Amino acid sequence: MTIASVLALVMTAGAVAAPAPVPISWTSCGNSAECATLQLPVDWSDPGGEKFGFRVARHQAKPELRVGTLVFGPGGPGDSGVGVITDPKRFDRFSQDLIDRFDIVSYDPRGVGQSSPMPCPAPASPVITSAADFDLRIQQNQAAWATCREDYGPLWEHADSLSTVRDIDALRSALGERQLTFHGSSYGTLVGELYAETYPSRTRAVVLESSVDHSQRTAGFLRTQAWALQDSFDAFAAWCDATESCALHGKDVHAEWAALLDAAGPDELWDLTATAHRSMYAPDYAGFAAAIATGDIEKQSAPQPTTAVFCNDWALPVRDYASYQRLITSNATRDLRYSAGVLAIGTCLGWPQPVTNPQHRLDVHTRTPLLLINARHDPASGYNWARSVAAQLGRHGVLLTYDGAGHGSYNRSTCVKAAVDAYLLNLTVPRRGTVC
């Protein structure tokens, strides 16, 4: 078979026809919202095969002001989009203008929340300290996955984000929308990126808030995650230096933190890192500084991804313990021994290769550029990821920078919020290089 014929087959396979509309039967489910469950294929290459329940929720616009539907992509992976719509405290992430003018719809991704959830045990600590532990971790992971595969069936290996993209396109069709208007947050940005790549003509507008860079391989993933966490810690230290109310003001923040790490036992090092990571999310600089000053740091868990989703999306193989040790050591941060990348490696160690939705550089060609919004100091989806995704998108993407800190930026700045709303409502794209 010639290269040309192979490419023709690939292009034909990629040109997937729009799914037939699926009837939606809405019922009231709280917060003036309606919920429904769509029966969709577990495996989109076999649309007549086994189905799963895809749970969705919507909050309707004011009829006289309605301009269309906005689909919100939740993060995690493992966050519930249905909960964003039905919980008033989470629904306030949208501006009143968007609430008035869009039907706002969200979903629980396959394998998450109320969409055939697939909880599967993960290791208590992601850090591996010996060759024996490395081999044991692979055995434990694979034993857990075999049990989960038996419990959850074929959805286990079809929980990837590219399959969720097909689910979203079925939802778009069922809602009667010719094109998709989408706002993805954190891990939800991966769905937005892949949707725009897969269905450019069906894409109206896509916001990527705290972008995921799905081009990174094992070493790059660890390196970029470590950079993001160190950058956020540096921003915290600079805030303490400049803020008299900081409990560590006038002290060497880096030295104070290092003293805590030096006094910690091996099992406590990850807990301290996870706590620092969580403290940078909001960010809670004042609380974190006070905890360091007193040495009384309340243990917080790091965000735990849903295994079936994350490990189907990321090929992060590590050959042996020597390779693992080199990767962890060479990608350690100056102030924090580990980043969230270490959790990702440990969670998926031993996962069958190739994965369902492997990493690649984006190839997006939409009429309206995608809008990326990112804090300058984000501990999880770092500014380095946003810049990388923007570079991959080229003229089909524009990065709007929030000159602040934290994971997520839409609700941290009136400037960012106004720009996003103008983009979603009117397709007004900010100037390149805009900083809020």
Image: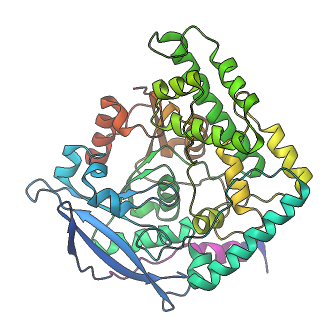
In the foreground, 385 or 142: 142
Quadrant housing the C terminus: top left
30 drawn magenta? no
Among the 4 quarters of the image, the one containing residue 201: bottom left
Among the 4 quarters of the image, the one containing residue 235: top right
Q: Which range of residues does the magenta coloring cover? A: 5-21
In the foreground, 240 or 435: 240
In the foreground, 430 or 6: 430
Which residue is rendered at x = 34% and y = 64% of the image?
Answer: 82
Q: Is residue 233 visible?
A: yes
Which residue is rendered at x = 49% and y = 69% of the image?
Answer: 164
Direction left: furthest residue: 64
In the foreground, 368 or 81: 81
Which residue is rendered at x = 32% and y = 43% of the image?
Answer: 423
Q: Where does residue 316 sit, x and y in percent of width and height?
A: 74, 57
Quadrant housing the N terminus: bottom right
Q: Is residue 353 visible?
A: no
Left or right position of 385 against 348: left
15 drawn magenta? yes
